[in-house]
Image: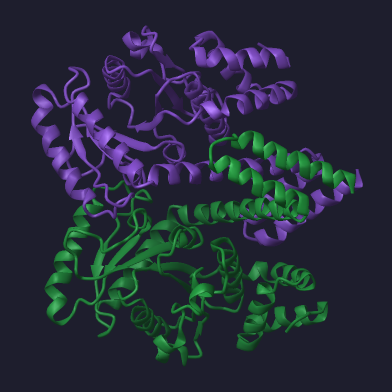
Chain colours: A green, B purple
Amino acid sequence: MSTASKEQVEQLAEALPRGDRRALARAITLLESTRAEDQDAGDLLLEKIAPLSGKALRVGISGVPGVGKSTFIESLGNHLIAEGHRIAVLAVDPSSALTGGSILGDKTRMEKLSQRTEAFIRPSPAGRTLGGVTRHTRETMLLVEAAGYDVVLIETVGVGQSETAVAEMTDMFMLLLLPGGGDELQGIKRGIVELADLVVVNKADGDLKAAAGRAASDYRNALRFLHPRHAGWEVPVMTCSALHDEGIDEIWKTVNEYRHHMTDSGELAQARARQAKAWLWDEIAANLVALAKESPAVGQLIEALEDAVSQGVQSPRVAARRVVDHFATNERGD
Amino acid sequence: MSTASKEQVEQLAEALPRGDRRALARAITLLESTRAEDQDAGDLLLEKIAPLSGKALRVGISGVPGVGKSTFIESLGNHLIAEGHRIAVLAVDPSSALTGGSILGDKTRMEKLSQRTEAFIRPSPAGRTLGGVTRHTRETMLLVEAAGYDVVLIETVGVGQSETAVAEMTDMFMLLLLPGGGDELQGIKRGIVELADLVVVNKADGDLKAAAGRAASDYRNALRFLHPRHAGWEVPVMTCSALHDEGIDEIWKTVNEYRHHMTDSGELAQARARQAKAWLWDEIAANLVALAKESPAVGQLIEALEDAVSQGVQSPRVAARRVVDHFATNERGD
């Protein structure tokens, strides 16, 4: 679908809550389009479905490649469907455009789950910047919620600031770890452990079962040194074997405890309001900057000043004022 | 000084590198002024001194109230002066306007140091927002560097996101801790430990000496679980007694090791370039938003949309486009 008329948008908006998967896929593609005419249609669609969104539990899942995210999501997804949920699996992976396709949200790695009608799996949007990918994923999240999926899982693999972005669009952030344990958090970027509301050591089976238990204990001790992210919630460290579907229901039970705690205390609603507002201001600033860059003269000025500022020969304050003055003058002179 | 002419700015720019403290104080005040005529003078001053800035080692110092920051800075400051340095002590404390004055950078708490001509101490700029205070402190840092201070210490007390802001304007981030140790990091906000390049347990004297040693050991173990912030630099955990001037020279020796390591690897220069560029974009976005808000109609629209977005009834994407479209229309219609 390249261009959508007002009627087509209305049809999409009506088809979504009926569980029409093809309508959902078309809606997501429409929102990802950068064509000017599609932007208006996309805006209209978002306005129509906004009252239907927000009703899912949003969980971010992070872990290094090899920790078993796909296996875990498949196991968890099947468990949730058995409990009556409808789950959507999204991903944030800004490198996908460079690596020729993301391994996140890859249906071939979640084969059984991808065949369930109660599951909707979408790979990371292709994008060069984290900001762009984040924006699309957030909007897709609103769409799948309007389509009735009541649990949204968002995968991230740890490129750049993906984790922070995913933590800032979800209600709960889960970190999967390998049972290797030992002294290092296996290349976990500093800052990610601190985002976690739940830590899970996977592959707790066979030879690695004892090691997984020890690793969990080590991480539990390390976490005691960090001030809690949310008052009154001590971050649990659990083990599981996604491959053998062991420990998965306990994990989801814990997720529910977290949800109840955060809902009762009002923190969930507060966090969502804060996230939405921050997203708004990101968008306003990004749109203003895009508007400024529309002028070739301003774009060139920005490039030249960026160099000067990086080398420390011009102060950012002065450089920024020049950019904005130039922009304001251009706008008014048109 | 309320309004500065071009000649006055040139005089200030010449007086600064001569070590003229009154000129420095006037220059700082000029940059903090929000009057339009002072903005131009401030810009001119920054342009003139830019080539002279950047030559100090910039160290952020954080810790809860009561950990002994003032005593530590006084002890460290005197040590540095004895080694031939000239030190500036600044502070980031956005709450100061609300609490009627900041206790950070308070000369009465660093009495001996404040009497040394080789030390320049400036309390946090008053400001309601972290962004404003951060901006002023960064500009003041450029001025004190142009004035020949070769070590800049920036205090922060842990309000909101002050630590991240200070970490993003310094070369090294130091965290002071109490010897209480035990299981909790005494109310240290999650995320701050992860910013530290050096951790120091203070008050390691008398009855608390053994406890301080144990606390340092505990923190050392906890830190091993975090991926290093900078490759090749294992964050040391040291003890000291600032009150008795013990351990201070070892601490500064370690700071120098860090500096050499980061300079040799090129990371110091890279970090500075990244910080300057990020500052530039913060300023560009802030200036554009300020420009947009100049229009009362746009300001009101933003407020209304913020509410709608917080409540989840409007998507940020659509709201932001409305703001920017309204702004662009207004600009062109003038």
* Residue in front for this viewpoint, A249 or B52: B52
Q: Residue at x 50, y 12 (%)?
A: B18
Q: In this view of the protein, can residue B281 be seen by the observer?
A: no
Q: In this view of the protein, can residue A177 be seen by the observer?
A: yes
Left or right: B321 with respect to A70? right
**Measured from the top left, where is residue A306 in percent x and y?**
61, 46
Quadrant containing the C terminus of chain B in the rendered view:
top right
**Measured from the top left, where is residue B123 in percent x and y?**
46, 19
**Measured from the top left, where is residue A61 in percent x and y?**
40, 69
* Residue in front for this viewpoint, A106 or A75: A106
Q: Is residue A5 above or below residue B91?
A: below
> Which quarter of the picture shows residue A14?
bottom right
Q: Which residue is drawn at 33% across and 27% down?
A: B65
Quadrant containing the N terminus of chain B in the rendered view:
top right
Left or right: B159 with respect to B22? left
Left or right: B217 with respect to A233? left
* Residue in front for this viewpoint, B97 or B80: B80
Q: Residue at x 71, y 55 (%)?
A: A290
Q: Which residue is drawn at 24% across and 81% down?
A: A246
* Residue in front for this viewpoint, A87 or B266: B266
**Measured from the top left, where is residue A95 in percent x and y?**
49, 70
Q: In this view, does A240 lie above or below B248?
A: below
